[in-house]
Amino acid sequence: MALCTTATPEPVLERLRDEGAMTWMQAMRLRDAHLPQGAPTSAALANLCAFRLDTRIAGLARSLGARYTRYADDVVLSGDASLLRASDRVETRLGAWALEDGFALNHRKTRRVTRSRRQEVCNVVVNAQPNLPRDEFDRLKAQLHACATKGAAAQNRAGVLNWEQHLRGRVAWAEQLNPTKAQRLRRLLDRIDWTS
């Protein structure tokens, strides 16, 4: 049972409390064994917790000729116009199933997006193929261009630790989503002189 839990060490709790980063109640909760957010086990535990819900939603999607995708707690149903027409009934059913399994829909985040609009999940545009949002791609391209022409250190205005690895990680993410489009970013990244 406690295999995936951790308890925050007392010196860390004391430092965080001294810095005003947490309340006494938060420290008490972290002192006890708890599931850490973002641990390597998080995805597997989320999948186990949502197994029954996944099975039900996947069956519903099949019956509607739609596709079901879930990433952590983001649920996506993709389909044609008939899915859009049934969306109120589908949302009601999903909400009931979620409650039965101990979850709740966040109706403020629920969206119905047609093919003609930008379809975005977890900050990834998914219309035709996975892509960074255009504004994010353009901002990264401009950042890389400025680093290549004016020097990398001068462009780290936010004081990001390990700036080079930060930019390499962002380019790698873009390459994973759309390798062809990200080639422009890779060429700019390769032009940067990190020694100056």
Image (tube, rainbow, N blue to C red):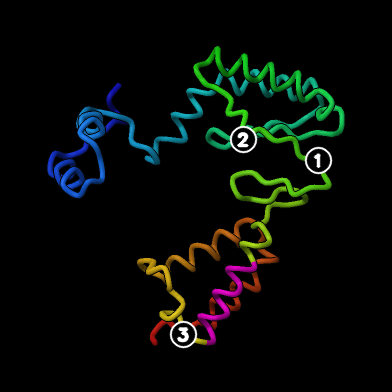
Q: In this view, does 19 lie above or below 148?
A: above
Could you tell me which quadrant the N terminus lies in?
Answer: top left
**Residue at the location (55% across, 15% down)?**
99
Disc 3 marks which residue? Answer: 151
* Residue 18's disc number: none
> Which amino acid, by three-letter code, is at mark 1?
Thr
Disc 2 and disc 1: Cα gap in Å? 16 Å
Residue 53 % position (x, y): 59, 20
Task: Please report the residue visible at 21 percent of the width from the left and 28 percent of the height from the top.
Answer: 32
Tag 1 secondary structure: loop
Disc 1: which residue: 114
Residue 15 falls inside the magenta stretch: no
Residues 173 and 32: in front is 32
Query: Which mark, residue 109?
Result: 2
The Cα atoms of the two marked residues, 3 and 1, are separated by 42 Å
Q: In the displayed structure, would residue 194 be above or below residue 175? A: below
Instruction: Give the magenta range.
Output: 138-149
Percent position of residue 2, x then y: 27, 25
Is 8 placed above or below 118 here? above
